[in-house]
Every structure is written in C-alpha cells, then in structure tokens.
Image (spheres, rainbow, N blue to C red):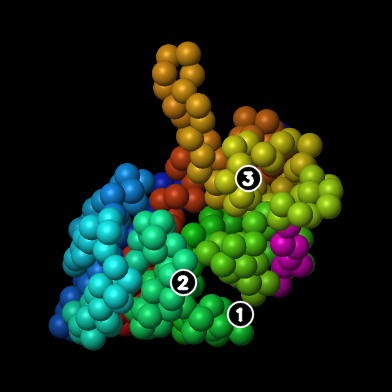
Amino acid sequence: MTAHIIDGKAIAAQTRESIKTQVTALKGKGIDVGLAVILVGDDPASHVYVGNKIKACEEVGVISTEARLPEDTTFDTIAKTIENLNNDDTVHGILLQLPLPKHLSDMQEDLVQMIAPQKDVDGLTTMNAGKLFLGMDDGLVPCTPQGSMLLIKSVEQNLSGKHAVVIGRSNLFGKPMAQLLLQENCTVTIAHSRTQDLAGVCKTADILVAAVGRPKMVQADWVKDGAIVIDVGINRLPPDTKGISKLCGDVDFDAVKDRASAITPVPGGVGPMTIACLLGNTVKSAS
C-alpha cells in the first residue's frame, strides 16, 4: 500500500478561491477587507513568511499593511502600534509576527493578549482560545490546526470514534488541534517529549499529527497500517555533498508513505494551508 499524498497546495488554492469570492462580496457591501502585520527585527524566516502572506493577500483582494519596526523596538512602542490598529476600522485582522527579538521574548504573550480578540487572526488571545475550548464557533481558530483539519477532512469526512494522537502540546498548535479533533468526536491523546513509549502510543492512532520540530522523528514502525498522517514539522537538514540543504518534516516521509493511507508532504502539505486559513480568519473578522 502506498499512501495518498495530500496536496496542500491544491487544497489551499481551492480555499483561496472561496475566500476571494467572499472578499468580492464584502467589497460589494462597501467593506474592504484589511490585514495588518507587525514585523519586529530582521529574522530572515519571518521576513519570508510575511512576504508570502502579503502576496497571498494581493491574490484574494485583501488589503495588507505592514508595520516594520527595528530590532531594538521597545515593548511600549509595539503596544502602542497594536492599540492604534485595534482602533483602526479599516483593519480587520492583526498579526504580530512571532518570534519577537530576544529582549522581548518574555513579554511576547503580554503583547499577543493586547490584540483585540475580534481582530486576533492567529487565534491566540484567551478569548479565542476559550471559545475554541467551549466549542463555540464564533471565535477565531489558530491557522495551522485549522488548515490541518481541512487536510484530514479532504480524505476522511467522518472522523467520529477514531483515535487521534497529536504529538506536541503547544498553545499555538497541539492544544487547539486536539480541541478541533474532539469536536469531530475523535478520542484524542496529546503526546509529547515526556510521554512514555511514544512510539507505542503513536501506533494506536487512526490519525497521527506530528508537530515537534525534530527531523524524521516518526518512523514507519510508529505508524498503524492505514493511518492518516499529518506532518506539521518543517526542519532544514544539513547540506548534502552538493551543498544543498533540503527541508523535511517530523515524519520520515519515504518510510511512512508505505504504511499510511494518506500523508502530507513537506514542503507542500500543511504550510500552504496556514496562510489560506489566515486569510479566511481575516474575512471572518471583517464579516
């Protein structure tokens, strides 16, 4: 058995087409959907991510603005920037690009919580996290778990009663992913670095979601025959003999694809869905 490769690029493109239609409809009602991104410092990966987000906004007709702040920006300056955007009626979504520079790392959570919940398109404020926990559908859900769920549903509509294992317990991904799976009536296990017999736990999963940031950690003998495997990790391998440094996920794709029924590749799996869901959250906020 060779797994069905879940094409995140294609599903993200379909999602963006639907969003584009919604943006056009809102424009017809006199609402220009707006997303503001706050980018602090010179982290190269963050600049790439923000560039991709702005390009995606243009594609669907969302107006994007950037607040670029220098590396040594103070907490108070960022707080004021957030306050101004909270009060700006032309901005429907606010994204504080993480991680922040080192001198702000202890204050990152405080800044995130200053974003107005209705504009919190990353879904990280306590209001949105609480709504997700309570199963309320009017909150904003973090983009990567939301995108991962769409990929799972693209291959299996009825998840009721299935055992899902999420490796990773972060507020950004692991916990919200578990909540989304619970809402689909899955039995959910959250596993992590301290889990005893992690491989054995994973092998019980009908749906296995890996988000740990360790290259190719999940091996074939961790995976139940016929499981759906969602690989959220994105890791850069050391350069090969030709000096080429490739990306890989947390799952050993080549080994696992012969056991799973469906699997996401890295790149081209979960990544494109994250940006599509960010646009979706911005439109939901504008609506």
Residue 109 numbered mark, or none: 2
Q: In this view of the protein, which residue sits in the foreground, 112 or 182?
A: 112
Locate the C terminus and report the quarter of the image it occupies. bottom left
The amino acid beneath tag 3 is Ala
Query: Residue sitting at 29 percent across and 75 percent down?
Result: 76
Magenta stretch contains residue 188: yes
Position of residue 178 in the picture relative to residue 64 (left or right): right
- Identify the residue under disc 1: 133
Q: State the residue position of label 3.
A: 262
Q: Please tell me whether mark 3 sits on a helix, a strand or a loop.
A: strand
The part of the chain drawn in magenta is 184-191
Mark found first going from the N terminus, 3 or 2: 2
Q: CA distance from mark 3 to mark 1?
A: 28 Å
Nearer-the-camera pick, 168 or 44? 44
Confirm whether residue 259 shows in the render: yes
Q: Are marks 2 and 1 in contact (CB under 8 Å)?
A: no
Instruction: Name the residue at 53% across, 36% down.
Output: 248
Query: What amino acid is labelled 2 in the image?
Result: Glu
